Image (cartoon, helix red, strand yellow):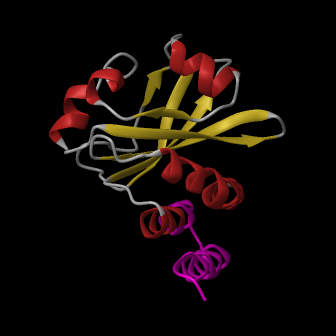
Amino acid sequence: MTDTTRALDAFTAELTGAATEEAAFDALCRLTKATVGAKLFTVMTSDTEAMVARRAYTDDAENYPTSGEKPIEMNRWFDQVLTRQEAFVSNTLADIDTVFPDAELIGKLGCGSVVNLPIIMGGKVIATMNILHEEGYYTAERVAQIHDTLRLPALAACAVAMQLAG
């Protein structure tokens, strides 16, 4: 049995036993860190009609709390992730700074690379899974692993969280 298989089995057990939205996303966070690696992990919901995003989950509540909403900005990130429904990958803090206004905080947390994976349900992006690590961390191989290993678990965790939310 591979490490990835063990991590997926643990995720499945945690997700099926999840009683709260946070527990569902905790399982996804642990799976992500065990398989691909992340220093910071969040999930943001997207409402493109109202043009707002809300942080539904964070593993760093001090720096990235789940409270409140923020406006969705029309930029290349929006076009790539929310319109074309493709993952956004950036491996330098300078590039991150061109699309995220909180790049300074990201850098202070020791992060300089990001993958934003759109979570798609019914043909619509309902959320993004956002994983950050040190600069240059998300190589082509790791990005492929994210797509191959985490796309379906991310959708499952969102579906369970939505069900638990009522």
Residue at image location 19% in from the left, 44% down from the top: 109
- Asked if residue 44 lies in the magenta stretch, the reply is no
Question: Magenta segment range?
Answer: 1-27
Where residue 124 appears, x then y in whole percent? 76, 32
* 104 versus 57 height, above or below: above
Whether residue 58 is visible to the viewer of this picture, yes or no, is yes
- Asked if residue 11 lies in the magenta stretch, the reply is yes
**Residue 66 figure quarter:** top left
Q: Tell me if 45 is positioned left or right of 104 in this view.
A: right
Residue at image location 61% in from the left, 27% down from the top: 81
Main SS class of the magenta portion in the image: helix
Residue at image location 20% in from the left, 27% down from the top: 104
* 162 versus 48 height, above or below: below
Q: Tell me if 69 is positioned left or right of 2 in this view.
A: left
Number of numbered markers = 0
Q: Tell me if 67 is positioned left or right of 116 in this view.
A: left
